[in-house]
Amino acid sequence: MTLELIAIYATIVFLIIGAIFTFVAAIGLLKLNDSMTRLHAPTKAATVGIGAFLLASMAHAYALGEPSFHELLILAFLFVTAPISANFIAKVNIHKRACEALPVPAEDEMWSTLDVPPGEEARAKPQTGA
Amino acid sequence: MTRLLHWLFPHPLLTVIMTIVWVMLQNDVSAGMVVFGVILGIIIPRITAVWWPDRPQGFRAGKMLSYCLIVIYDIIVANIQVAWIILTKSNAQLQPAWVEVPLDLRTPEAITLLAGTITLTPGTVSADLSNEGRSLLVHALDAPDPQAVCDEIKQRYEARLKEIFQ
């Protein structure tokens, strides 16, 4: 069994793993019915699902005889940026009150997303019926 | 001499990272690319040094590496757990909860890393920080016991980050 053959099998395995996790994330996005819980599904697909696809790409490049390391870089940038988009979606949910009531912080006065200057209060209020 | 070195490398770790990223971007490990990467790694931290006057000093790279490995392992394990929850539990059985994590960390860099780690590990998303930065708001997908989630975050991640940013 040569290394190239192992690389081809690794490509297949990683593609299947990636497909399964992306599929589960899509199911989660459809099934979950609350905007905060729905946020959990795609952020997870971005980690293991895409990670497995990128590993498959690396294994395939190795099987073709031209090793490539771009994918590790893509993975690193993805891991750095994915939490930021998730955090912004969560902040939008908090602003629109599209989630359960927040607990009161134990040590500080309030959560920073809701900490708006008094004049801005009217604009920050949820618009009913929107 | 040390002042010259400090002027050349205001942020030695960033120099190393820039070099590695450049070589990986080129997909070509040759002497020319490494030299060019080192040149970039000296110029860019030098130019951007004014923007981090208060960066944390005692950063332990070795501990950071083991932390990364733990996080990757957790991401894989927790991903399988969350996939299982999504496929088998109905919406009514799911118990989403807000979890408040009181923070012992104070440096913004460490808190950012902790929040990013919490979001990357499936099942939890960090949503907000309190206005004085002393506690973190985390949303858990399925947490019958919110206190256990809080304890796990504090012991598994925050304790290690505290050692990294000493």
Image (cartoon, grey):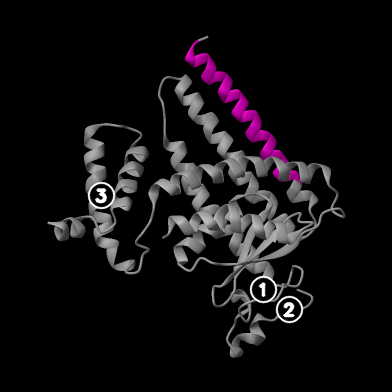
Magenta-highlighted stretch: main secondary structure?
helix
Residue visible at 47% across and 45% down in the picture: A76
- The residue at which mark 3 appears reads as B40
The amino acid marked with disc number 1 is His
Badge 3: few (under 14), some or many (20 or more) residues near its Cα, within 10 Å?
Answer: some
Label 2: which secondary element: loop
Q: In the rendered image of this protein, does residue A21 appear above or below residue A30?
A: above
User: Mark 3: which amino acid?
Assistant: Leu
The image quarter containing residue B31 is top left
Residue pointed to by mark 2: A127
Camera-side mark, 2 or 1? 1
> Badge 1: few (under 14), some or many (20 or more) residues near its Cα, within 10 Å?
some
Picture residue at 66% right of the left edge, 76% below the top: A106
Relative to B66, residue B92 above or below: below
Q: Which mark is residue A95?
A: 1
Percent position (x, y) of residue B98? 72, 65
Q: Chain of mark 2?
A: A
The disc labelled 2 sits on which kind of residue? Gln
Q: Is residue B109 left or right of residue B58?
A: right
Locate the C terminus of chain A by quadrant: bottom right
The secondary element bearing badge 3 is classed as helix
Mark 1 and mark 2 in contact (Cβ < 8 Å)?
no
Q: Start and end of the magenta stretch? A: A2-27
Q: In x, y percent, where is residue B131?
A: 57, 77
What is the C-alpha distance between the residues marked 2 and 1? 10 Å
Q: Quadrant of residue B73?
A: top right
Q: Residue furthest bottom?
A: A119
Chain containing mark 3: B
